[in-house]
Amino acid sequence: MSEQAQTREDKADEARQARREFLSYASGIALALALTLVPFWAVHWHALPQTALYIMIGAFALVQMVVHFRFFLHIGFRQKRDDLQLILFSALLLVIMIGGTLWIMGSLARRMVLP
Amino acid sequence: MSRYENFDYPGLNLGGGHGETHDAAKTTVFGFWVFLMSDAIIFGLVFATYVASVHATAGGPGPKDLYDIKSVFIETMLLLWSSFTFGMASLALKYRHSTPRLIGWLLVTLALGLAFLGFETHDFLTMIAKGGSPERSGFTSAFFDLVPLHGLHVTAGCIWLLALLGQVARYGLDSRTKLGIMRLALFWHFLDIVWLAIFSVVYLAGLA
């Protein structure tokens, strides 16, 4: 292949990649908008009973977090091992600390008949 | 530059075409990611404090008296679109679109961030006017611990963005300014994730 043809091919390759990455941001914002609008709509119009609303808000927030990580922060399964381990370790710490705090404080509130 | 290129660090990878900057990013961006994860732990604990205190209103106003869903919705849209416009700036950086185009997207992002801060400040002042100032109850203290902490982060992000614009003007797009923009991009997208937790846990759950 001549050098010129090689350059042309590289350019086309780069253009394809640029388009794919633009589409990644575009699908990110489209998904995030949908995942935001639905719970706002449901809460504003009280479309569901309260417990169902809580579950829905939580589920949509978790899915939207994954969408942001995937499409905006570009974290994927082909991530370097160090990055993934750091994310998983931080998630573990968060679960232990948030879960532990809510458990202990909730138990305390019940035992002391706080609101 | 194949379809199966690996992610060498969080955020948009510049790729081999940026040579030295791409290699430097492997360590600097990873280091910044460590900071972001530790920041996430701080936010997580402040969230836990908020959820543990949400019923402690001490006879004062509660979430339903103080929150305004329309204003929160506008803030959410501003921040979400600012994440997208920062993404466009990242693409302009990676594919070497013209520098004015990069600066344009960064300025749009800055404007959206400042508008967000304006709406949020207005919210806080309205809440205080309704008797929900931080010292009123455990609930308002926890609220003003969590939500303005995020606002402070956004303020820091805006100042950082201005500093980077100054660096682009003074030094051009050299390796250090590029690395700065890449790290601010991570910071900005990270703050959007914290905000989605705030509007879900604080505002939507509070109004449900």
Image: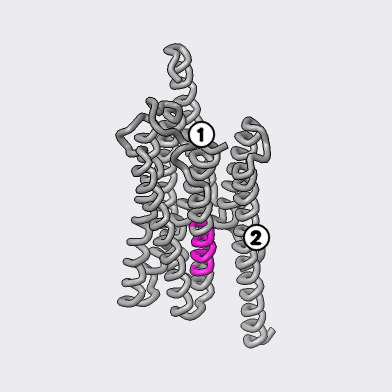
Of all residues shown, which one is farthest toward the front?
A: B130
Asked if B167 appears above or below B204 in the picture, the reply is below
Locate the C terminus of chain B and report the quarter of the image it occupies: top right
Number of numbered discs:
2
Q: Which residue lies at the image location 66% right of the left edge and 78% below the top edge?
A: A12
Locate the N terminus of chain B and report the quarter of the image it occupies: bottom right
Q: Which residue lies at the image location 60% right of the left edge and 34% below the top edge?
A: A54
Q: Please name the amino acid that badge 1 sits on.
A: Leu
Asked if B187 appears above or below B40 in the picture, the reply is below
| Residue B68 coordinates in the image, percent (x, y) | 48, 46
Q: Which residue lies at the image location 42% right of the left edge and 39% below the top edge?
A: B41
Q: Which residue lies at the image location 42% right of the left edge and 61% below the top edge?
A: B115
Query: Does any portion of residue A82 appear in the rendered image?
Result: no
Q: What element carries label 1?
A: helix
Q: How crowded is mark 1: few (under 14 residues within 10 Å), some or many (20 or more)?
A: few
Q: What element carries label 2?
A: helix
Q: Cβ–Cβ below 8 Å for labels 1 and 2?
A: no
Q: Mark 2 points at which residue?
A: A27
**B200 and B103: which is toward the camera:** B200
Of all residues shown, which one is farthest toward the right?
A: A1
Q: Distance between the residues labelled 1 and 2?
A: 29 Å
Label located before the other in sequence (1 or 2)? 2
Q: Name the residue under label 1.
A: A92
Asked if B98 appears above or below A60 in the picture, the reply is below
Tell me: A105 left or right of A12: left
**A92 and B70: which is toward the camera:** B70
Image quadrant where residue B27 sits: bottom left
Tell me: B94 left or right of A21: left
| Residue B108 coordinates in the image, percent (x, y) | 46, 69
Q: The disc numbered 1 marks a residue on which chain?
A: A
**Magenta-highlighted residues:** B79-89
